Image (cartoon, rainbow, N blue to C red):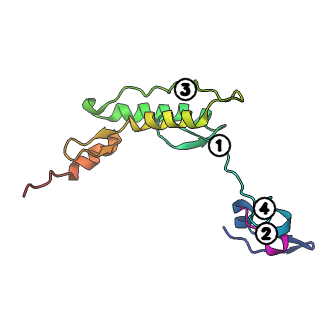
């Protein structure tokens, strides 16, 4: 949503885009310029964690709420599948890499979680593309072998 810049009580208010993207109004460029004096400072995104079940990104505080709910949803969907498409429960990857400051290596953790989520995909026996099991059933209705020439 774009809000117009305007005056309120004699103060200049910037648009939401300016605040979140680190852009500045010309009148204020000198106040938030980087050390080189020509580039505005960049606002960092908060760190995110990849869910090992669905592969989506969540905030570091939200992931502990999301994972049990996602696993419950996974069980419900897995139980609805035909027996030949049912999968074993995904296991949370164990990443013990700790950096110099004593924190877990978020990149290594996210890479392991992404790999775990991707391992849940099942290949189509006709074309070889991979899908979540419930989507594979829909895909197989229209997937036809390529005609040989």
Mark 4 or 2, closer to the camera: 4
Label 3 packing within 10 angstroms: few (<14), some (14-19), many (20+): some
**Residue farthest along the right direction in this orientation:** 10
**Which residue is pictured at 80% across the width and 63% down the height?**
33
Separation (CA) of disc 1 from disc 4: 26 Å
Separation (CA) of disc 1 from disc 3: 17 Å
Label 2 packing within 10 angstroms: few (<14), some (14-19), many (20+): some
Residue 5 is labelled as none
Magenta region includes residue 26: yes
Separation (CA) of disc 4 from disc 2: 23 Å
Return the disc, 4 or 2, that comes first in the chain's sequence: 2
Mark 4 or 3, closer to the camera: 4
Horizontal side, residue 29 vs residue 45: left or right: right
Horizontal side, residue 54 vs residue 32: left or right: left
The residue beneath circle 3 is: 95
The one nearer the camera, 52 or 133, is 52
**Which residue is pictured at 92% across the width and 74% down the height?**
10
Return the disc, 1 or 4, that comes first in the chain's sequence: 4
The residue beneath circle 2 is: 14
Task: Pick the quarter of the image with the C terminus.
Answer: bottom left
The residue beneath circle 4 is: 36
Label 1 packing within 10 angstroms: few (<14), some (14-19), many (20+): few
Return the disc, 4 or 3, that comes first in the chain's sequence: 4
The residue beneath circle 1 is: 47
The one nearer the camera, 65 or 56, is 56
């Amino acid at each position: 949503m774009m809000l117009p810049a305007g005056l309120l009580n004699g103060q200049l208010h910037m648009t939401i885009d300016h605040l979140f993207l680190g852009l500045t109004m010309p009148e204020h460029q000198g106040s938030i310029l980087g050390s080189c004096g020509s580039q505005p400072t960049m606002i960092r995104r908060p760190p995110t964690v990849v869910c090992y079940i669905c592969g989506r990104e969540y905030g570091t505080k939200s992931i502990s709420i999301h994972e049990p709910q996602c696993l419950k949803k996974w069980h419900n969907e897995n139980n609805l599948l035909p027996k030949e498409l049912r999968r074993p429960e995904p296991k949370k990857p164990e990443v013990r890499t700790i950096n110099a400051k004593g924190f877990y290596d978020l990149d290594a953790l996210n890479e392991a979680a992404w790999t775990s989520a991707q391992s849940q995909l099942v290949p189509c026996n006709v074309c070889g593309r991979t899908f979540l099991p419930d989507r594979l059933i829909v895909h197989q209705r229209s997937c036809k072998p390529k005609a040989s020439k």
